């Protein structure tokens, strides 16, 4: 049996690994600094928490729109969108999850994420209107 949404499937695996990495990154900081709740006014902890939260907010809707786009109107652009989304989330996650990455990782990571989501939404909407 063929997997029906192969690009979305691989993208989901990649982004799930990224999400778990960000999760463990927050957990390790909590344990090493004995922070049970919140961020304890620790800037690095605050940054890690927000990076994890942002991934939790952005990844699900991006995967839903990617899956629906791949289902409604499959084509080469799905791979381009998936690569852009994955690269964007990875850059964003590196900036927030690991101290020392330049601010440009955040900017370009979010830019790639938003461009990928907008492309997916535009293709999905076009497919829904004209199919």
Image (cartoon, rainbow, N blue to C red):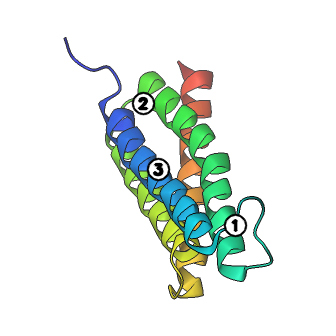
Horizontal and vertical percent position of residue 8:
39, 35
Mark 2 residue element:
helix
Q: In this view, does 107 lie above or below 65?
A: below
Mark 3 residue element:
helix
Cβ–Cβ below 8 Å for labels 3 and 2? no
Image quarter where the N terminus lies is: top left
Could you tell me if residue 95 is visible in this image? yes
Mark 3 = which residue?
A: 20
Q: Nearer the viewer, mark 3 or mark 1?
A: 1
Mark 1 residue element:
loop
Question: What residue lies at 57% left-to-right and 65% top-to-bottom?
Answer: 31
Q: In which image quadrant can residue 86 be found?
A: bottom left
Q: How far apart are marks 3 and 1 (CA)?
A: 19 Å
Q: For the image shown, how many numbered marks are present on the structure?
A: 3
Residue 83: give its label: none
Horizontal and vertical percent position of residue 75:
34, 36
Q: How far apart are marks 3 and 2 (CA)?
A: 25 Å
Mark 2 = which residue?
A: 70
Q: In which image quadrant can residue 108 be found?
A: bottom right
Question: What residue lies at 59% left-to-right and 23% top-to-bottom?
Answer: 128
Does residue 37 appear to the left or right of 49 in the view shown?
A: right
User: Tag 2 or tag 3, which sits nearer the N-term?
Assistant: 3
Q: Distance between the residues labelled 2 and 1?
A: 42 Å
Along the viewing direction, whichever of 104 and 14 lies nearer the viewer: 14
Residue 35: give its label: 1
User: Tag 1 or tag 2, which sits nearer the N-term?
Assistant: 1
Horizontal and vertical percent position of residue 21:
44, 57
Horizontal and vertical percent position of residue 53:
67, 55
């Amino acid at each position: 049996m063929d997997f029906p949404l192969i690009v979305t499937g691989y993208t989901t695996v990649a982004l799930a690994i990224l999400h778990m990495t960000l999760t463990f990154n927050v957990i390790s900081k909590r344990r090493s600094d004995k922070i049970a709740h919140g961020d304890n006014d620790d800037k690095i902890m605050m940054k890690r928490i927000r990076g994890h939260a942002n991934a939790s907010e952005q990844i699900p809707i991006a995967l839903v729109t990617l899956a629906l786009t791949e289902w409604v109107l499959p084509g080469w652009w799905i791979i381009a969108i998936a690569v852009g989304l994955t690269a964007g989330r990875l850059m964003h996650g590196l900036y927030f999850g690991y101290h020392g990455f330049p601010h440009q990782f955040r900017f370009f990571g979010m830019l790639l994420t938003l461009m990928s989501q907008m492309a997916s939404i535009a293709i999905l909407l076009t497919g829904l209107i004209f199919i």
